[in-house]
Image (tube, coloured by chain):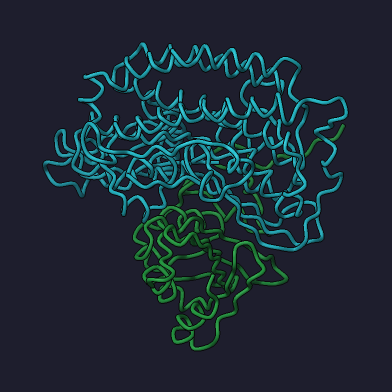
Chain colours: A green, B cyan
């Protein structure tokens, strides 16, 4: 990956030199949450990067102490065979970020999944509903402080471990 | 009592409400519900179809009926104990999923280079056997979806031989737990290579038969050619991978691109869709690409067997568990690894904090999940009978969609 070119491309957008971690697998970069759409658009259209595929969106909860959540985008460029990992940190009280569905359509279901599991709101997503869990489920299951609800539609969810 | 049952019905409706409201429909529109219990949805996929007579206006897939909390389980288990859960994601191609997972953890531990060649060859051998089994399911059930009954029985008969071979090696028919981090559960059983060779000799004419009865069948071509065309740029934008992307005309296979394991030492081609019977990227192309991949897998298996009986022979001293770490505690890092599964790119994202034996986060990017998301796009404006043909050609396994 051409690091200087990447910095040249992104510095005008994020108004500072990007923090690139070259030793990570794949190369990772920390992005401010307001800039995600602009950065995505620049990376997906620039002729020497052309990240045309969004492989994976991962939501992540760092727990109560750190009080942050993260969204991690794994990009891949088919013509140049390059990987890039974008990391965005969000606050835990108000996890909101712009949806990148206008750039990559594969964000559609993956953002819905992150919303379902972590309650991260993707602004501008046309159809942000729960995807894996039932729509009347309480809470976001992959948060670190998640407590299972006692009962769901008359079915006991939370079982006490019986020790004999 | 009656009152209560009414409540239950309402509660069930609340749990997975439809996207379209009956009151808001135009006079020519109607809602058709397909699934979750429907033979041609390959498991528990529910499709909410908004149609104008026979023409489909919009399809909304509802998934999650087979959600088994893989990622939540993974956060609470040591790395080596996650492997059985990985098996249960794509339950018709467990070996391939295991391969992707153990490669990921080995990469985190930095022991990828130390894995003996014999182990790698065995891994590729069983993974390719499993790939054939998975493609057989895809082709056979697809034929049955659109009315061809015989090929299904033929492929299930041949798949049975593969399952028995893998059962002999690992002890179970579908969910193997055979590949371990840093090695294998056991070496191949004595005589496995010979039996596998016999199987390949048996299989080759059967593949030709399958080609003739299904792929080149006129009725099959009529039902699938020019149906559900997926253009290449749309496929990439939707993150579609695997045989579906190749059928759309892009020569992209992670076994070649990433050159992981011993694939660079093996010779095989990547078939792509050519639009022989219709348009590039139609349902026929997808099935044809899968069929060609079976031939390529046979080629890989033959080469693996050749290597396993000559260069990397079975020896008395060989211990497939020699490198298996007793305690798996990778350094703090984020890693994304991917491998070519029969359905497409299976990716794992790991975050380890360096202090625990359990991953802080283990996300599985299932190819079926991403491939299924393109369904609404390619089934707009088709007939309802064609929708069945399109869903079958995606070859999704609900265990991996819902995880």
* Residue drawn at the location 29% of the way across and 30% of the way down: B389
Q: Is residue B1 left or right of residue A118?
A: left
Residue most extreme to the front: B310
Spot occupied by residue B110 in the image (x, y as percentages of width and height): 75, 54
* Residue drawn at the location 74% of the way across and 46% of the way down: B79
Quarter assignment of residue B360: bottom right
Spot occupied by residue B52 in the image (x, y as percentages of width and height): 15, 39
Spot occupied by residue B146 in the image (x, y as percentages of width and height): 29, 22
Instruction: From this view, report whether residue B91 is shown above or below residue A142.
Output: above
* Residue drawn at the location 22% of the way across and 19% of the way down: B219
Q: In the rendered image, which quarter contains the C terminus of chain B?
A: top right
Q: How many marks?
A: 0
Q: Is residue B2 left or right of residue B100?
A: left
Q: Is residue B17 visible?
A: yes
Quarter assignment of residue B190: top right
Q: Is residue A160 visible?
A: no
Instruction: From this view, report whether residue B122 is shown above or below residue A101.
Output: above
Spot occupied by residue B116 in the image (x, y as percentages of width and height): 76, 40
Of the pair B260 and B131, the residue shown nearer to us: B260
Of the pair A25 and B20, the residue shown nearer to us: A25
Instruction: From this view, report whether residue B262 is shown above or below residue A47.
Output: above
């Amino acid at each position: 990956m051409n690091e200087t070119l990447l910095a040249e491309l992104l510095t005008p957008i994020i108004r500072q030199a990007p923090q690139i971690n070259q030793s990570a697998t794949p190369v990772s970069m920390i992005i401010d949450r307001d800039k995600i759409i602009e950065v995505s658009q620049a990376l997906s259209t620039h002729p020497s990067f052309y990240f045309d595929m969004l492989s994976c969106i991962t939501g992540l909860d760092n727990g109560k102490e750190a009080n942050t959540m993260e969204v991690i985008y794994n990009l891949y460029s088919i013509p140049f065979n390059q990987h890039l990992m974008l990391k965005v940190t969000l606050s835990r009280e108000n996890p909101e970020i712009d949806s990148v569905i206008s750039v990559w359509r594969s964000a559609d279901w993956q953002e819905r999944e992150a919303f379902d599991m972590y309650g991260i709101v993707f602004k501008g997503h046309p159809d942000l509903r729960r995807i894996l869990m039932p729509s009347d489920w309480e809470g976001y299951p992959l948060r670190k402080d998640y407590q299972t609800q006692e009962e769901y539609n008359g079915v006991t969810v939370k079982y006490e471990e019986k020790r004999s | 009592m009656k009152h209560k049952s009414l409540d239950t019905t309402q509660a069930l409706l609340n749990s997975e409400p439809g996207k379209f409201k009956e009151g808001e429909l135009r006079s020519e529109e109607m809602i058709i519900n397909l699934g979750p219990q429907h033979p041609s949805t390959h498991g528990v996929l529910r499709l909410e179809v908004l149609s104008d007579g026979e023409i489909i206006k919009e399809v909304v897939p509802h998934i999650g009926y087979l959600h088994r909390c893989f990622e939540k389980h993974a956060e609470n288990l040591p790395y080596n104990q996650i492997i059985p859960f990985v098996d249960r994601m794509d339950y018709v191609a467990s070996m391939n999923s295991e391969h992707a997972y153990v490669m990921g953890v080995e990469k985190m531990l930095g022991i990828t280079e130390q894995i003996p060649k014999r182990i790698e060859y065995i891994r590729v051998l069983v993974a390719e056997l499993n790939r054939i089994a998975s493609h057989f399911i895809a082709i056979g059930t697809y034929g049955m979806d659109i009315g061809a009954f015989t090929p299904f029985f033929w492929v299930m008969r041949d798949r049975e031989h593969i399952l028995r071979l893998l059962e002999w090696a690992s002890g179970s028919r579908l969910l193997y737990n055979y590949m371990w981090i840093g090695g294998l559960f056991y070496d191949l059983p004595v005589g496995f290579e010979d039996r596998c060779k016999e199987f390949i000799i048996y299989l080759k004419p059967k593949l030709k038969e399958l080609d003739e009865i299904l792929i080149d069948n006129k009725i099959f071509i009529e039902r699938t050619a020019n149906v559900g065309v997926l253009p290449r740029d749309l496929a990439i934008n939707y993150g579609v991978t695997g045989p579906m992307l190749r059928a759309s005309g892009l020569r992209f296979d992670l076994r070649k691109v990433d050159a992981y394991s011993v694939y660079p030492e093996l010779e095989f081609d990547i078939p792509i869709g050519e639009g022989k019977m219709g348009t590039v990227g139609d349902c026929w192309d997808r099935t044809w690409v899968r069929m060609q991949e079976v031939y390529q897998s046979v080629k890989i298996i033959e080469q693996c067997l050749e290597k396993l009986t000559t260069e990397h022979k079975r020896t008395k001293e060989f211990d497939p568990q020699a490198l298996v770490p007793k305690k798996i505690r990778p350094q703090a890092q984020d890693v994304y690894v991917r491998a070519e599964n029969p359905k497409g790119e299976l990716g794992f994202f790991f975050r380890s904090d360096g202090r625990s034996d359990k991953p802080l986060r283990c996300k599985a990017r299932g190819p079926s999940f991403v491939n299924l998301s393109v369904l609404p796009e390619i089934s707009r404006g088709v007939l309802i009978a064609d929708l069945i043909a399109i869903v079958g050609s995606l070859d999704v396994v609900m265990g991996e969609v819902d995880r």
